[in-house]
Amino acid sequence: MLKLLTRTIICWAITGLGLALAEDTISIEAAWVRSAPPTVNVMAGYLRLINHSPNNVTVNRISSLQFERVEVHRSVIHEGMMHMEKVESLTLTGHQQLVFEPGGYHLMLIAPHQPLARGANVSLALEFDHGEKLMIETLVKDGPEEDSMGQHGSSHHQH
Amino acid sequence: MLNRFKIPLVALALLLAATASVVLLKQIEPTPLEFDSSMGIPVMSPPIPLPEVNLVDQHNQPFQTSTLKGSWNLLFFGFTNCPDVCPTTLNNLKQAAKQLSQQPIRYIFVSLDPNRDSPEKLKDYMNFFNPEFTALTGNKAEIDRLSEALGVIYDYEGDTSSDDYSVNHYAAILVVDPQARLRAHILPPHSASKIVTGISLIMDYYGN
């Protein structure tokens, strides 16, 4: 009986520890969507993705309520020539921070369901291979600077 | 009597001719302006004349290369389906234009994707950044003649028969002088301050 209880407690402890670790594995900061003419079919999203764990974490899927689909691309400028490369699989190594910024990694937000002007909200969902799902609210802005309210894109977790 | 002075007179004439040539050449093409290589603004000396091409602007009005004459021009080649580099650059040009409002500079966006970028589409696109900027499209062969002369290389990636392809392209801002000659490239990354510094120094140095 005692053996069973001990084993149960140990299992709970491990699960609890696992959940605790998963809780803060990934965070997202400074997310924003670049404002664009109302007729465009694609907009760019930028953010900072932080892996707080020592393990590799892979992004399985990114989606948005406001767009048909979301892809990750990287602008690479070599000798003045700009190439845009689609990033099929995005993995962050342990404790890696990945910055999405103009001229580099960016979210390609494809086919908006309706035009999104400056100040409009954009919801993004990021799903990771360890089961974590992050929901984030961003604003459409001209640039990365803080808006007058001093707010950044805020995120919350779902399991 | 003149015979005695024949050689000195010829020498003097040659000296005057040489001096006149140097002075004349200096007026036509001065010593090249050179920026520090870290700035990423290579200057062409002598400048490269552009071929005469026929394009159309966002108001469906004809545009010839000769229209570039009479003022300094900043050109950028891109496409409206570009989510990152083109809007970023146009935004920087918009900010630069505000700081350069006293200078008679023309800002021109040239589409490398005439298949999707119609004049109407360009009009909506440019209105978002600055309706006073010029946006050009037209026959691909004409665009190619201009882009080749300016060193703007590009290619299409993806299925061009669909609506879902991208354009890889040279992303420098081209500086064209009031004689419609390519004078400099402003290489990326090109912030508004880099654009303002670059074009101001070039205009001060080369004048009109």
Image (cartoon, coloured by chain):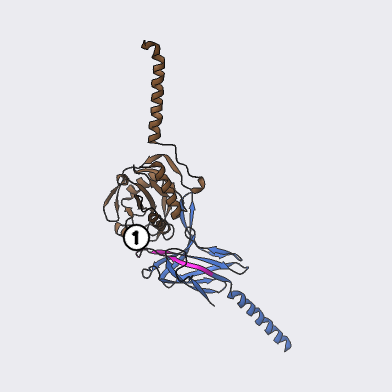
Chain colours: A blue, B brown
- Tell me the amino acid under the disc marked 1: Tyr
**Nearest to the observer: residue B81 or residue B131:** B131
Which residue position holds label 1?
B125
**Residue B177 lies within the magenta run:** no
With respect to residue A129, does B97 lie above or below? Answer: above
Q: Residue furthest right?
A: A2
Q: Residue furthest left?
A: B61
**Residue B140: % across, % down:** 33, 50
**Nearest to the observer: residue B55 or residue B67:** B67
Residue depicted at 73% across the width and 88% down the height = A2
Whether residue B187 appears in this view of the structure is yes
Which element is circle 1 on? Answer: helix
Magenta stretch in the rendered image: A28-45
Mark 1 crowd level (few <14, some 14–19, many ≥20, 10 Å Cα): many
**Residue A35 lies within the magenta run:** yes
**Residue B131: % across, % down:** 32, 58
* Picture quarter with the N terminus of chain A: bottom right
Q: Horizontally, is A4 left or right of A94 in the view?
A: right
Residue depicted at 43% across the width and 41% down the height = B44
**Residue B151: % across, % down:** 41, 45
* Picture quarter with the C terminus of chain A: bottom right
Residue depicted at 40% across the width and 36% down the height = B29
The chain that hosts pointer 1 is B
Whether residue B170 appears in this view of the structure is no
With respect to residue A116, does A19 lie above or below? Answer: below
With respect to residue B136, does A34 lie above or below? Answer: below
Q: Main secondary structure of the magenta part?
A: strand
The image quarter in which residue B191 lies:
bottom left
The image quarter in which residue B46 lies:
top left
Instruction: Say how many tags the image has.
Output: 1
**Residue B65: % across, % down:** 31, 45
